[in-house]
Amino acid sequence: MPKKKTLLDRFSDLTWNDFEKWAGGKILSRGKNYQRQGRVSDLAVTEDGRLIAWVAGSKRYATRVVMDDDGLPDSICSCPYTFDCKHGVAVVIADSMSVIVKALDRSSLDADDKLAWALDAVLEDQYGICETFAEYLHRRHPKSAWSVQANLLLGRLKKFKSGKNTDDFIRDYDRDRLSDWTIHALERAGRKNEVIRFCETEARKTGSYDRLVKRLIAVQRYKEAEQWIQEGIRATKEKLPGIAVGLRNRLLEIRTAEKNWPVVAAIQVDEFVRRPSVQAFKECRKSSGRAKAWQKVREHLLHFLKKGEPPWKQKGWPLPESGLDRPVVDRHNRFPLVKDLIDIAILEKNPNQVLRWYDQRPESRFGWHGVNEDAIATAVQAHAPDRAVAIWKNKAEQLIAQVKPSAYQDAAKYLRKAAEVMQRGKMGQAWEDYVKTLRTQHRRKRRLIEILDGMEGKPIVKKRS
Ligand SMILES: [Zn+2]
C-alpha cells in the first residue's frame, strides 16, 4: 500500500493547471492578486487537515479549504459566492507557497542548492507570486553559498540574450531583474567592492544608471555620481526620458545634501520651465527662499508664464547655472499660461490677479476646461462676491441644461454656494427672485423642482412672520 500523502505533499503537488481546472481563469487571477496583496491572514492547518484563514476583501471573510479526493481543493467561504471563490484560491496559493518554502528550508539539499532553487523560483516567476521566495532569499544564508550563486548569476548574465533585437540599448527588465539578484548575492557574499563596478557595466547595457548613481551617492562618491548622471542623461533623454528625469532628481539630491540652495533652486527652475505647475512653483519658492532670492526668482517665473521668455534669459536673473542642459520650452505652450497664472494667484491669495487672468481665458465654443472654476469662485468670493455668484450660477445652469437628475444634484451644490454668498451680501431678495425664475423656466423638469424644493426646505433665509 502506497504511503498516504501528507497534506504538505498534496498541496505542493498542485499545478497551475489544477488551479485553472478548479477555479477557472478569472477567479484564479483574482485569487493571485489577493494573495500577492497580502490579504490572507491567520493561515492555519486544522487537525483534520483543513486550511483555515481570514481573507480581507470588501469585508473580512472566513475561508476554509479541504483537499478533495480528486486532488483538487474545495473551498467554502463566508462571502456571497460561498464555494470555490477567489478568497479560497488566495488561501491555497498562500499556503502552497509557504509550504514549499518550508519544505525547501527543511530539505536535505545543501545551502548552495537551496539558494539556487529559490533564485530560480524568483527569476522564473511568471506569476509574480514568489514574494515568499524573495523573503526566503532575504533571510540569513552562509556567505560562501551566496558567493557561489553570485558567480553562477554573473555567468548567466554573460550568456544572457535580450529578447529584443536592436542596436540601441533598450530597457530590459528581465536583465535588470537578473542583475538585481546578482547584486544581492554579491552583497550577501561580502563582495560589496564588486558591486559598483558591476553596476557601471550594466548601466551602459540597460540604461540602469539610476541604480548605479543611487549607490555612489550612498557612499558619498559624489563626483563620480555626477559624471554618471551627465552620461546617463545624454544617453537616455531622447528614448527613455523617464530615466533622465530620475537622474536630474539625483543631482538635486546631491546639491540638497550639500545645502547648495542657489543650484538646488536653479535645477527646480529648470523643471518649472519644462513643466510649469503650481507644485513646481512651490518647490522653487522653498529653495529660492533658502538662497535668499525668492522675490526676484518669483518675478522672473511669472514673466516666463506671461511671455514665454526663459527666466535665465531675462535681465537680472539671480541664480547660477543648474549644471544640466537648459530645458527647451515646450512649443505647444500658448503664452500667457493662464491656467498656471490663476493657480498661482489662488496660491498667493491674490483675488485681483485671479480675476485678471480668468478674464483672459481662451475663448472656446466648447467651453473652457483649463481650470477649476469652482476654485476660482471660492478664491474671489469675499473680494468680488458678484463675480463668484455669476460663476456658480453659470456652472449650475450648464448642468441643468444637461437634463438629468445627477447633473441637477451637482447644480444644487453650486446654487447653495451662490445662495450663501448672496445671503451674506444681503442679496436675499435677489436670490429668491433668481430661484423663482429658475422654477418658471424649468417647471417641466420635475426632478429639478424637487431638488429646489429640498434646498428651500432647509431654510437659507429665515422668514419672519
Ligand atoms: Zn469568498
Image (cartoon, rainbow, N blue to C red):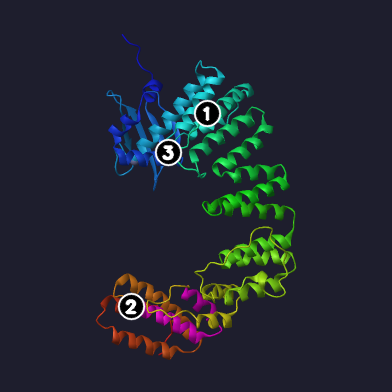
* Residue position marked by numbered label 3 in the rendering: 35
Callouts 2 and 3 close, C-beta under 8 Å: no
Q: Label 3 sits on what residue type?
A: Gln
In magenta segment, residue 447: no
* Residue position marked by numbered label 2 in the rendering: 400
| Residue at horizontal 33 percent and vertical 28 percent from the top | 66
- Magenta highlight range: 372-399
Give the side of residue 109 with respect to residue 189, left or right.
Answer: left
Give the side of residue 278 with respect to residue 444, left or right.
Answer: right
In the figure, residue 450 lies in which quadrant?
bottom left
Q: In front of the other: label 2 or label 1?
A: 1
Where does residue 171 sit, x and y in percent of width and height?
A: 50, 44
| Label 3 Cα crowd, 10 Å radius (few <14 / some 14-19 / many 20+) | many
The disc, 1 or 3, on the residue closer to the chain's N-terminal end is 3
- Look at the numbered disc 2 and give the secondary structure of its residue: helix
- Look at the numbered disc 3 and give the secondary structure of its residue: helix
In the depicted view, which residue is nearer to us: 320 or 464? 320
Residue labelled 1 has its Cβ within 8 Å of some atom of ligand 1: no
